[in-house]
Amino acid sequence: MTEPSKVIHVRNVGHEISENDLLQLFQPFGVITKLVMLRAKNQALLQMQDIPSAVNALQFYGNIQPSIRGRNVYVQFSSHQELTTMDQNQGRGDEPNRILLVTIHHMLYPMTVDVLHQVFSPHGFVEKIVTFQKSAGFQALIQYQSRQSALIARSTLQGRNIYDGCCQLDIQFSNLDELQVNYNNERSRDFTNPNLPTEQKGRPSQPNYGDAGGMYAVHGSGDGAVGFPQLANAAAIAAAFGGGLPPGITGTNDKCTVLVSNLNPDRIDEDKLFNLFSIYGNIVRIKLLRNKPDHALIQMGDGFQAELAVHFLKGAMLFGKRLEVNFSKHPNITQGPDTHEYVNSNLNRFNRNAAKNYRYCCSPTRMIHLSTLPQDVSEEEIVSLLEEHGTIVNSKVFEMNGKKQALVQFENEEQATEALVCKHATSLSGSIIRISFSQLQTI
């Protein structure tokens, strides 16, 4: 086995595969500094910024077979430790270019295309913006019409904060020549083409930079499919978790049904379970076991979502009980008078923005994030809505892209979990509010 290197050797690179195709295949795993296409050999050499990024990529594609435009490509470490066949610039970010790679540190507020456009457009015409999540944090590619505009923006904005005391900009030059934008939405925008759709219809024909999938159809290797066998957008999941998977998540589980025990039968119901488990995936149906009132079966959308739920909720406290969450021996729940159906519920979170929802998966925290709030909501109204569930340590109402949102910090995780299961998807002044756990430590 060749020793690990930040240079990756790619074979079976057909003439129909472009540099951009390869860049997007490996972009979820880290910054790519160099790329050499060996057209005569149907091969390519690609250099990541560091060895851990290359290791993550090869570990991921060791379990699943990457395919570009219907052609399987094969990847391994190169015998080269460093590529010198392109420019002598050893790191991405030194050679001026009209495309900027922006990393946002200490991000306390959500970041969208509109916010970035407000920040970068005063320095020149911004043609395109693509955002994505990496292990380094939230990142964006900003394409200006001219290199001069990018130079001015970088020199003016480098190290500055978007908001007071947070959201610090770390700006490098990208080595990409052109950004590819497929959808105009909160994650990507082509300001030169306002007629692009906002969301993909069915399976995507091409990926975004942060959500590789679609034409990069990922298939299980060998006869027994491994590595997200039930998901077409497996690389999007890898991108959501920073190029890999959370510790303890294998991505190989195919059991969709979860058994929850040690519930508080006096306070739990199907909708409360839906509110909690829908953080980790779509819910098909839920059944409370009448002969065991502290047990419930929950059928998730697929095995990966079920694995996330088991991983993040095992041992969580709710209504004074420590939950036991395990895979059920039943492959699914038979529909009947005792089952509650959620398969067509518009409250399922993963029907849209799946990669973003995967990214926000975590164990219960003391902090909850509230969105889709009434525009005239006050902090007092938020506190009044939630204070019955525990001691509120801190709270804040803020506006992002013209929409009111809030952060509320409880004394402990159990109180925050109770507030979420009881108040998610309830009405506040005519608005159906959405509640998630936040991974922020303080407000």
Image: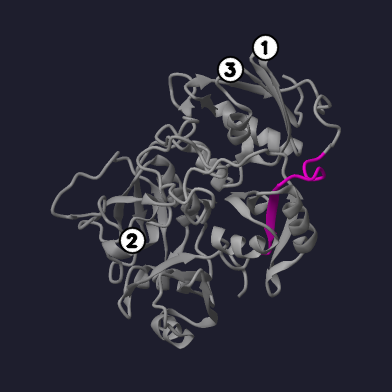
For the image shown, how many numbered marks are present on the structure? 3
Q: Amino acid at mark 2?
A: Leu
The magenta segment: 91-106
Q: Amino acid at mark 1?
A: Lys
**In the rendered image, which residue does mark 2 sit on?**
273
**In the rendered image, which residue does mark 3 sit on?**
15
**First of labels 1, 2 by sequence position:** 1
Q: Residue at x 48, y 43 (%)?
A: 182
Q: Nearer the viewer, residue 392 or 103?
A: 103
Which quarter shows the C terminus?
bottom right
**First of labels 3, 1 by sequence position:** 3
Q: Position of residue 224 (x, y in %)?
A: 43, 23
Find the distance from the CA under tag 3 to the CA under tag 1: 10 Å
Instruction: Name the secondary structure under disc 1.
Output: helix
Which labelled disc corresponds to residue 98? none
Q: Amino acid at mark 3?
A: His
Pointer 3 local density, CA inside 10 Å: few below 14, some 14–19, many at least 20: few
Q: Nearer the viewer, residue 246 or 343?
A: 343
Find the distance from the CA under tag 1 to the CA under tag 2: 55 Å
Pointer 1 local density, CA inside 10 Å: few below 14, some 14–19, many at least 20: few
Type of colouring: one colour
Q: Position of residue 270 (x, y in %)?
A: 27, 61
Image-based side of 62 in relation to 174, left or right:
left
State which quadrant residue 317 falls in.
bottom left
Q: Nearer the viewer, mark 1 or mark 2?
A: 1
Above or below residue 228? Residue 142 is: below
